[in-house]
Amino acid sequence: MKYQIHDIIFDTQEKALFHNEGSILLEAKSYHLLLAFIQSDEPVLSRDKLIELSWPQQVVSDGAVNKAISKLRSHLEQLSPDVEFIVTKPKFGYQFCAPVKILSGPNNTLGSTKIKPSVKLQNRWVTIVICTFLLISLFFLYIHNTLQNTEEKSKQTEFSQFRFTALDGVETKLSSAKDGQVLFINTDVNGQASLYLKVNKNIPKVLPINLTDVRDIRLAPNGKVIGLVSQNRESCLIEQVSLASFDKKTLLDCSQFSDVKIAWHYDMKRLFIQARKSNATPYKIYQFKIATQVLEQISLPQKHAALNGDFRLAAHPTQPRLAFARYLESDRSEIHVLNTHTLEKLATYSVPYVVGALAWDAENDVLFFTAEKTLLQVDTQSGSKHIIKQLSYPVESITSTFSPNGKVLLATQYHPSSRIKRYDLNTQKTQTMLNNAALNRLPRQTDNQSLLFLSDMMGTHDLWQLKGEALHKISLPFEFGFRRFQADNQEEHVLFEKQGALYELNLLTNEVNKLITAEHKAYIANYSQDDKNIIYSSQKSGQWQLWLFNKTTFTHTQLTQYGGYSGYQYQGGLIYSKRNQAGLWRLFDSKETLLIKDFSNINWLNFQLIEDKVYFYRKGSGIWRYNLTTKEAEKVMESNQHFINQFHVNSAQNAILFAELKPIQGDVQGFVIN
């Protein structure tokens, strides 16, 4: 059976949704839920009715229904984002409001706008004529759909999967040459990194290149040289290394930048560079002409300077094409394609994901990109986008090259996991509070000794609570995702941002309340000392400033004039950081004072104000405590290489919770492109 839901085709036999923007395979709950909606004659379905139709003879919680509705909404809106498919009717249930037509199937009327019992005709001959006409129409529609589906499937890429490497540890930073050589870094369980080169089915060989301070590395299209970025606190160099002699040649001093990534132009006369001035400024794309030593910015014009930037650059190995991603929101990006000879923009593709990795097909005008565990494809000739593979683990990097089996797409994938530990500030001893195979992050401890944290142990990024030995997931009407959150002083509510709106979760009732609508573009939010106000950052005025929201009067007041990103109320003023400038600041009587100069913007995620103490993180050093009264700073906890800058100091100031990565295992997976 096939249905048309607005401009989406629902194929019940394949259990999939099809659209010119892509296709989605439905999991069982989404499939049965969608069938329940479109096959029901009732305009609004209650929760009980949905459970009866979709979960027969099962005990199902409201949270499970909410999650299933949210998942189905997400699938439909991913393919057709401008359509409202499911409307929540408070106290009644849910209404499926998109138009539905039957395209093919037994005993159904072709093209009906809603599924209803067929009306019996009184005139027997009229019935025969109409039925004959419908059967003929159905036959030709079947032939048309079959040919169309065959044509569409012929356009889509098919893959057969194989394992490309099986080294101990994890592989990262894939790149390849046109002759089939593949370069990657392997980091073993002890944290030792080595550079490997693999040619087709040969055993990978270790290259004698020291990877200390190496931040990025790329094999050139001709397979004869490597470009690498070496960066530390004092310097940054982009160098060229010969694979014949391993001699190094400096191409560019990149000390003005941080977080530098590179890509070779297909003729090797230019390098494309992704970089930013500091961690408080957006990423931009530059081109560096090797012969003339000219460096030129080619992306992110000034009008887009408030965005998080352009990143994930990929240069075509044989054609003058450059692709990069532009971050828009936590669930929305754009992929831009430039002609590298003229720098003319050839195309822009909107995608409902944050792009994780990006690579061109080894010979064609086809782009591959990833979003977490999903591998997708963009045909740059037609603009069509579709999902081509759901993988088991998140993807770190991808590349396309040739092998004896033909053209292949390679992907490094692994699933990081982390434990949550507690460091006692008095005894200086550490104990493990939570240890499993999931990625556990952003720990927050309340005075009643319960632990709030984010985890992907159920396959999605959810908010969890640990009380004693009892562990449970907090049910929400949407996936929580990786986002900063804060508990109030009474530890009954959790405050967080989602797509510019601020929400408050009641931990006692599990209810979610929207406090601030998305038009205010709220981001980092903190409760005031009495929980009656909220201090949040926003760029609704054109730049990042701090605002005060009064929960009683529902009014918004701008607090800062010269920038603000994350802040707390303190003695009638503010203690805060800025988005585009390092430092911790104090605002009192309209006067701004710099308190700590060596205070990185990275602290927006964790920095805390408890009484007159500020706790913050210094990269490569550890957690520090600054006394606002004495103006003195001291290190209170040393960090190690596994520390991931996510910590929380309890209100008694005698312990620090923090997240620590565990050794990672992963392989390079190969996909033969047919």
Image: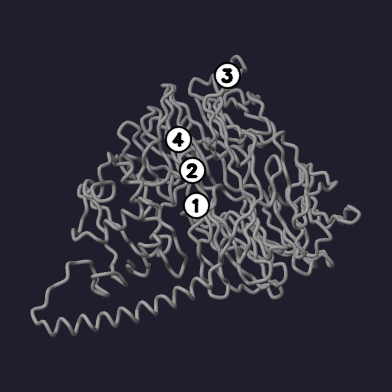
Cβ atoms at labels 1 and 2 below 8 Å apart: yes
Crowding at dot 2, Cα within 10 Å, few <14 / some 14-19 / many 20+, comes out as some
Q: Residue at x 59, y 40 (%)?
A: 416
Residue 265, above or below 493 = below
Residue 133, above or below 355 = below
Q: Secondary structure at mark 3?
A: strand
**Which of the two marks, 4 or 2, is nearer to us in this view?**
2
Find disc 4 in the rendering and name its residue. Answer: 486
- What kind of colouring is applied to the model shown? one colour
Q: Quadrant of residue 477?
A: top left
Q: Name the kind of residue labelled 1 in the image.
A: Ser
Q: Residue at x 76, y 46 (%)?
A: 214
Q: Nearer the viewer, residue 135 or 429?
A: 135
Q: Position of residue 279 (x, y in %)?
A: 64, 47
Q: Position of residue 41 (x, y in %)?
A: 19, 61
Distance in Å between CA atoms under marks 1 and 2 = 9 Å
Q: Nearer the viewer, residue 489 or 116?
A: 116
Distance in Å between CA atoms under marks 1 and 4 = 19 Å
Find disc 1 in the rendering and name its residue. Answer: 330
Q: Nearer the viewer, residue 455 or 327?
A: 455
Q: Name the kind of residue labelled 4 in the image.
A: Gln
Q: Name the kind of residue labelled 3 in the image.
A: Asp
Q: Position of residue 501 (x, y in %)?
A: 40, 49
Find disc 2 in the rendering and name its residue. Answer: 483
Q: Secondary structure at mark 1?
A: loop
The tag earlier along the polypeptide, 4 or 3, is: 3
